[in-house]
Image: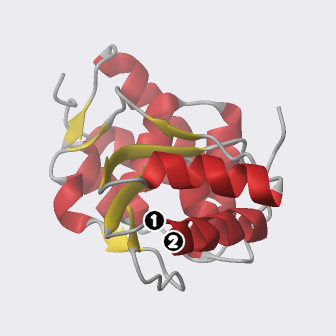
Amino acid sequence: MRRFSAAEVRQFLGSVDAEVTGPCRLVVIGSTVAMLWSHRILMASGDIDVVSVEGQGFAEACERVGARLGLPIPVQRVGVFDAPYSYEARLEQAPGLHFKNIEVMLPERHDWALMKAARGAESDLDHVEQVHQLGAFDLATLVERFGEMQFVGPPRRLRQNFLALIERLFGTAAAEQADRALPEPRG
C-alpha cells in the first residue's frame, strides 16, 4: 500500500478544494489527523479516514485530483469507531488549512488520543507518542475523558489499552495512579 506524506495530503486536499463546486465539510479521524496538526509530525498515511463528508461532488473531485496529480489517496468513511461522548462538540478546524470550499474538522487532541488508545494498534500508539512529544496531552484531561468513552468492545480491553498509553506517555507511576482513579467506561 502506498503511503502519503503530510505535504502530499495537504496538496491533495487543496487541489480537491479547487475542484469541488460548493461547500464541503469533512470530519477526519485516524492518523491523518496528526499529520494535519503539524508539519513536525514525521509519518505517512495510506488513506484519509473520515466520519462524515457533507457537501456535493467531493468523492468525484477526489478521483479527478488523484488521477491528475498521481496522488490516489483513498478517502474512506469509518463506520464504527470508539470515541468519547460529545467529541463532536469539541471538533476543531485543521490548523493552516484555509480552503475556499472545504472545511476540514479534526477531533480535539485528547479525544483523538483516546480514539487511538481504544484501537490499541502499536502504530497508533507511536503516532500519539509523536504528538505528545510536542507537548500535546494533559493527563487529567485524558483520565476525565476516559470516563466519557463510547466503546463497542470489552470495557476491560479499553481500560488496558488506555493504561498502556498512559504508561507510555507519562510513566508507570502515572498509569498506576490513573488506574485507581478510572471509572469503568460506558459500553
Left or right: residue 145 compared with residue 20: left
Write the residue at 50% across / 30% down. Answer: 119
> 177 or 70, which is in the foreground?
70
User: Looking at the picture, does residue 156 appear above or below residue 69?
Assistant: above
Q: In the rendered image, which residue does mark 1 sit on?
A: 20
Neighbours of disc 2 within 10 Å: few (<14), some (14-19), many (20+): many
Q: Where is residue 105, by image quadrant?
A: bottom left
Write the residue at 49% across / 82% down. Answer: 95
Q: Is residue 3 visible?
A: yes
Left or right: residue 181 compared with residue 167: left
Write the residue at 30% across / 20% down. Answer: 155
Image spot of residue 8 (x, y percent) = 76, 64
Write the residue at 43% across / 46% down. Answer: 50
Neighbours of disc 1 within 10 Å: few (<14), some (14-19), many (20+): many
Q: In which quarter of the image is the N terminus?
A: top right
Residue kind at label 2, given as amino acid type: Asp
Left or right: residue 120 compared with residue 68: left
Q: In the rendered image, which residue does mark 2 sit on?
A: 17
Residue kind at label 1, given as amino acid type: Val
Q: Is residue 171 visible?
A: no
Checking the image for residue 70, the label placed there is none
> 139 or 151, which is in the foreground?
151
Between the residue at mark 2 and the residue at mark 1, the CA separation in whole angstroms equals 6 Å
Image spot of residue 68 (x, y percent) = 77, 57
| Labels 2, 1: front one | 1
| Disc 2 element | helix
Q: Quadrant of the C terminus?
A: top left
Q: How was the colour assigned to the protein in this rendering?
A: secondary structure
